Amino acid sequence: MACSIGIAAAVGPAFARTIAPVVERAGFTTLWVNDTPGHDALEVLAAVAEVTDTLGLATGVIPVDRRPGEEIAGQVRALELPVARLTLGIGSGGLRRGALDAVRTAIIRLRDGTGARIVVGALGPRMRHLGATTGDGVLLSWLSPALAAAQAAEAHRAQDGAHAALYVRAALDVDALPRLEAERDAYAGYPAYAANFARLGLAPSDTVLTPDTAALRLPGYLDAVDEVVLRMMLTDPGDSVAAARFIERAAEILAS
């Protein structure tokens, strides 16, 4: 199954331009970029596109409460992103009411305005079903291999050919463990994620990869879904040397 690398838009275009060729040469499928407040994942992907030839480009995810579908489509065109390589991951963001309708509308606008693949970041079953049937698939996160396999199978049953990708936070260097733990604990404290962990009976610590567990647990994730996105956890997220070391280590694990 496919394996990709994930970064945050906050690292900026220059960092992405430096590491993207390393990701491509190492054989990873796609570079996913989290869209974060004050930073633009699409601009980062434009920088990646300039220095790569075959590497997939993906957003994970753009919240449609902050950026509606027509705005996203317009920026894809303005940046001249290569849509044959592009996956637009979108999500409901902070919406508490009308989330399904908002995401459905965004999918329609993106369908009309781009030729990119569209996946939906989803926790609950209705949003996952929407992603699989109206979009082109789902972007899952914070799951064990067994739960990821079950949710991927659910998406495939809902729509033949639906793509099931999974974000897995990973620290492959002992020095990066505090950052991984801080991210894990932060998400565990967000109400929507806390409720999801409780509903699934899942400990957040069972959803991440550490230097001690990565080689043992990554194969289970790869068997569970169509694409695993290794979200790089680094002591300094903008350290390109540490990023290259992470990519090299991840490639070694995949080859072993």
Image (tube, grey):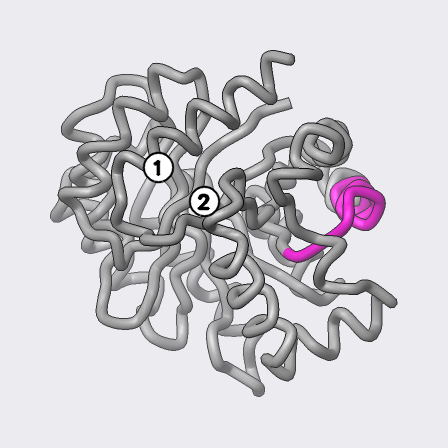
166 with respect to 91 (left or right): right
Location of the C terminus (image quadrant): top right
Location of the N terminus (image quadrant): top right
Residue for badge 2: 232
Q: Is residue 144 magenta?
A: yes
Q: In the rendered view, would you say 83 is above or below 176?
A: above
Q: Is residue 9 magenta?
A: no
Residue at (77, 32) in percent of width and height: 220
Residue at (59, 52) in percent of width and height: 134
77 with respect to 235 (left or right): left
Residue 161 seen from this side: no
Q: In the rendered view, would you say 166 is above or below 142?
A: above
Q: Amino acid at mark 1?
A: Ala
Residue 136 seen from this side: yes
The total number of labels drawn is 2
Real-space Cα separation, disc 1 to disc 2, in angstroms: 8 Å
Q: Which label was assigned to residue 33?
A: none
Provide the secondary structure element on which disc 2 rests.
strand
Residue for badge 1: 243
Q: Which residues are magenta?
A: 142-154
Provide the secondary structure element on which disc 1 rests.
helix
Q: Evaluate if marks 1 and 2 touch, with contact meaning CB atoms under 8 Å apart.
A: yes
Q: Residue furthest bottom?
A: 97
Residue 204: % across, % down = 71, 63
Mark 2: few, some, or many residues within 10 Å (few <14, many ≥20)?
many
Residue 82: % across, % down = 25, 31
122 with respect to 87 (left or right): right
Residue at (65, 35) in percent of width and height: 214
